[in-house]
Image: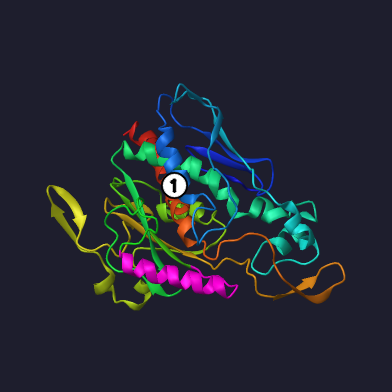
Amino acid sequence: MSSSYGENIRITIFGQSHSDAIGVTIEGIPAGERVDMDELRRFMERRAPGRNEYSTPRRESDVPEFLCGIAGGVTCGAPLTAIIRNADTRPQDYAALRAAPRPGHADYTSQVKYGGAQDASGGGHFSGRLTAPLCIAGGICRQLLAREGIEIISRIKSIAGVEDAGELTASTAEKDFPTVDDARGAEMRAAIAAARAEGDSVGGVVECAVLGAPPGLGDPMFAGMENRIAAAVFAIPAVKGVEFGAGFAAASMRGSENNDAFAVNDGAVVTVTNNCGGILGGITDGMPVVFRAAVKPTPSIAKRQRSVDMTALRDEDIEITGRHDPCIVPRAVPCIEAAAALAVYDALLGRRKETKWI
């Protein structure tokens, strides 16, 4: 399985949804960096399950336990490994999955790929549960970026077709439901509740912005900042699309509309608009890096669905049991921030190596 990411820092995520523990190993963080454990726990709490009416009832503390790499609260230069012990597991809820795959999940494809050796409980290594160790690594990178004057903010842009109002200019992290406009957030909650009452689910879009990223991060072709961020964000199982700046809307514009004019402001080169999302040629231009991620509806729903019996090779209807979010989007918000933090910090370390020789 490909469960590693990064060039200048390298993270490897391990564990399964219902294994004894899940975790992450991080290599390449410079020695001497203090990790604020209270801040990290607050960040992890934003993703943790079982905290509100639009989350799964599964209760997990999601408190990281550091095994190595930190001494006295400071990184020591050795690989850093942290785990989260799974407590509220129910592998029996998934006993039938080897024969009848759940629509929208990786049950069928993992069966084809691994020939039945995969852990099917809760989706195993394919589960959104593995975004918890992603948030450990990304949460640490967020702290390191903040010391460089780089802030990552995000919001729920839409759920079930209900669009947030206003612009993303400041953090929504302190809100229970992270939208800019609280009234629109209430409409989104109502849409989630309606879907849940019908045994269904809804999806949406998360918007994220990286503020303060210096110009010069990223490389052309296969290591551009779009590539790096998208690769990290697509590690979140529910993400089905990523766009930067104007994104797909740029396809309907003329060049005169889409081009971002340059100007000088306080002695710095800036762009008047930001349709490029802060990235040109794969390299940051100093403007906010803005992107949006499309999050699909939770595939585990209470409605009866069509599937197959893979043993008998016949059609079969299934009803999914277990505990599931009626909407993944609110808990995906910090995960997307974590993915962005990993990508940007990795690129920042790479840029420092480059400029040593300039």
Q: Quarter of the image holding residue 349?
A: top left
Q: Quarter of the image holding residue 41?
A: top left
Asked whether residue 160 appears in the rendered view, the answer is yes
Asked whether residue 159 appears in the rendered view, the answer is no
Q: Is residue 352 magenta?
A: no
**Crowd around label 1: few <14 · some 14–19 · many ≥20 (10 Å):** many
Q: Quarter of the image holding residue 323?
A: bottom right
**Residue plotted at (44% across, 71% down):** 190
Would you say 16 lies left or right of 231 here? right
Residue 86 in the image, given as x and y percentages of width and height: 63, 43
Would you say 98 lies left or right of 195 here? right
Residue 112 in the image, given as x and y percentages of width and height: 76, 61
Seen as rendered, the residue at the extreme right is 312
* Of the pair 210 and 153, the residue shown nearer to us: 153
* Of the pair 165 and 209, the residue shown nearer to us: 165
Note whether 74 is above or below 237 in the view shown: above
**Three-letter code, disc 1:** Ala
In the picture, which quadrant includes the C terminus?
Answer: top left
Question: Magenta segment range?
Answer: 181-203
**Residue plotted at (49% across, 69% down):** 192
Q: Main secondary structure of the magenta part?
A: helix
**Residue plotted at (54% across, 40% down):** 11
Residue 270 in the image, given as x and y percentages of width and height: 20, 55
* Of the pair 157 and 289, the residue shown nearer to us: 157
Note whether 179 is above or below 42 in the view shown: below
Q: Which residue is mark 1?
A: 343
**Residue plotted at (79% across, 75% down):** 316
Note whether 339 is above or below 308 in the view shown: above
Q: How many marks?
A: 1
SS at mark 1 in the image = helix
Would you say 59 lies left or right of 211 here? right
